[in-house]
Image (cartoon, rainbow, N blue to C red):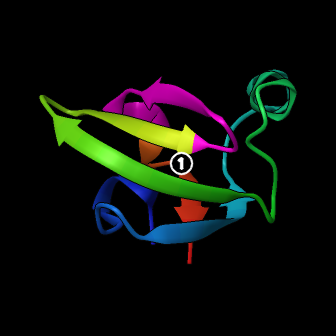
Amino acid sequence: MPLIVAPINRPVKVMKILTDDKTKKHLESLGVTIGSEIVILSQSGGSIICKIKDGRMAFDKNLATKILVA
């Protein structure tokens, strides 16, 4: 399922990232890799705030639909 519809406050695992190579490399440098665990902290106005490892990150709606999690 896309990250945008994942449940809040439950850990999910990144299964696939459906973006171009430049964006994939940028996300990997920030800790968003296939197999990494993400917890959605909040959703508002089309953006999502997630906890990845020890940090927090915000994704817009377009990018959140391209990150598939399970």
**Residue occupying the far bottom of the picture:** 70
Q: Is residue 54 above or below residue 35?
A: above
Q: Which residue corresponds to the image point at 76% horizontal and 58% vertical from the top-left?
A: 36
Q: Which residue is mark 1?
A: 66
Query: Residue 16 sits in which quadrant?
Result: bottom right
Question: In this rendering, would 9 be left or right of 65?
Answer: left
Q: Is residue 58 magenta?
A: yes
Residue 61 forms part of the magenta stretch:
yes
Residue type at the position of mark 1: Lys
Residue range (magenta): 52-63
Q: Position of residue 19 (x, y in %)?
A: 68, 39
Name the residue located 83 percent from the left edge and 21 percent from the top edge: 22
Circle 1 SS class: loop
Give residue 53's quadrant in the image.
top right
Q: Position of residue 17 (x, y in %)?
A: 69, 51
Between 4 and 19, the residue placed more toward the observer is 4
Which quarter of the rendered picture does the N terminus lie within?
A: bottom left
Q: Residue at x 45, y 41 (%)?
A: 50
Residue shown at the point (81%, 49%) measured from the top left: 33
Q: In the displayed structure, does residue 20 sit left or right of residue 64?
A: right
* Image: 39 above or below 35: above
